[in-house]
Image (cartoon, coloured by chain):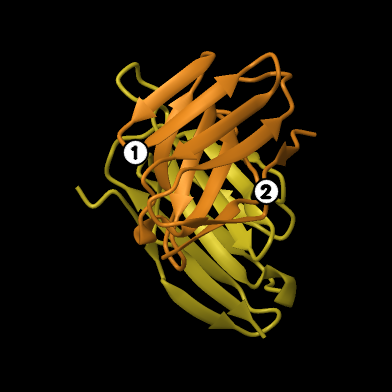
Chain colours: A orange, B yellow
Amino acid sequence: GQNIDQPTEMTATEGAIVQINCTYQTSGFNGLFWYQQHAGEAPTFLSYNVLDGLEEKGRFSSFLSRSKGYSYLLLKELQMKDSASYLCCRGSYIPTFGRGTSLIVHP
Amino acid sequence: NAGVTQTPKFRVLKTGQSMTLLCAQDMNHEYMYWYRQDPGMGLRLIHYSVGEGTTAKGEVPDGYNVSRLKKQNFLLGLESAAPSQTSVYFCASSSFSAKTNHEQFFGPGTRLTVL
């Protein structure tokens, strides 16, 4: 299979930094995506990594290690509006999603 | 651009009834996907299409059929609805041109309840 593992739930404080990890099966890999999904809404694209290293986009960064089958999403300067589910997704053409990490940001 | 649209937004069916969910995209994307999302299960791929006239099975295809007669439309059919098909259904599309990140664009979802 193409198991994708990520934590079910995380909590953090407004203004803090949080790292959401994702591990996946490495065979046939062709890209790793992160999506954000607010309750009752559709997922929206956050980041895409196909090569090793860190991709930074404003407050959000995503890291990939292809040899380790590992990625993380880093959220800095957390805001209340960042409370959402974060979905790790492996693959471009035939995507496979993890079960999502519910992030709760409290004051 | 409207992006990806889905109709209907909500539907309640009785067991054994049939229905069709319509997905439309105006971005000229080649790939289109149908997912279902259940609590604690994440997004699971039902069927997908790599172009007009082609479809393929995803992770959970049983009980569903699809058609892509036009590039912009992807239809999901339930021939005989079952309570296990109660879910939120999302359609998505993507392009694999050099100018994109290959990300998926999602429709707003259809909330289906089967009694």
| In front of the other: B113 or A52 | A52
Q: Can residue B69 be seen in this view?
A: no
Amino acid at pointer 2: Pro
Residue placed furthest toward the right: A1
* Quarter that holds the N terminus of chain A: top right
Left or right position of B12 against A39? right
Residues packed near mark 2 inside 10 Å, few (<14), some (14 to 19) or many (20 plus): some
In the drawing, does residue B73 fall left or right of residue A3? left
Question: Is circle 2 on the same chain as circle 1?
Answer: yes
Chain that bears disc 1? A
Q: Residue A59 carries which label?
A: 1
For residue A7, which numbered disc appears in the image? 2
B71 and B89: which is toward the camera: B89
Q: Position of residue A67 (x, y in %)?
A: 69, 13
Chain under numbered label 2: A
Which of A79 and B75 lies nearest the eye of the viewer?
Answer: A79
In the image, residue A17 sits, relative to residue A70, either above or below, namely: below
- SS for callout 1: loop
Tell me the amino acid under the disc marked 1. Arg
The percent position of residue A70, horizontal first and vertical second, equals 65, 26
- Using the image as rendered, state which of residue B89 and residue A45 is in the foreground: A45
- Tell me the number on the disc at residue B92: none
- Asked if the residue under mark 1 is in contact with the one under mark 2, i.e. CB atoms within 8 Å, the reply is no
Q: In this view, does B62 lie above or below B102?
A: below
Tell me which residue sits at (55%, 28%) in the image.
A32
Q: Where's residue B73, x and y in %?
A: 39, 48
- Residue at 64%, 79% in the rendered image: B17
Residue at 59% from the left image edge and 82% from the top image edge: B13
Residue B51 shows in the view: yes
Residue A39 location, x and y as percent? 46, 66
Q: How crowded is mark 1: few (under 14 residues within 10 Å), some or many (20 or more)?
A: few
- Disc 2/disc 1 C-alpha distance (Å): 21 Å
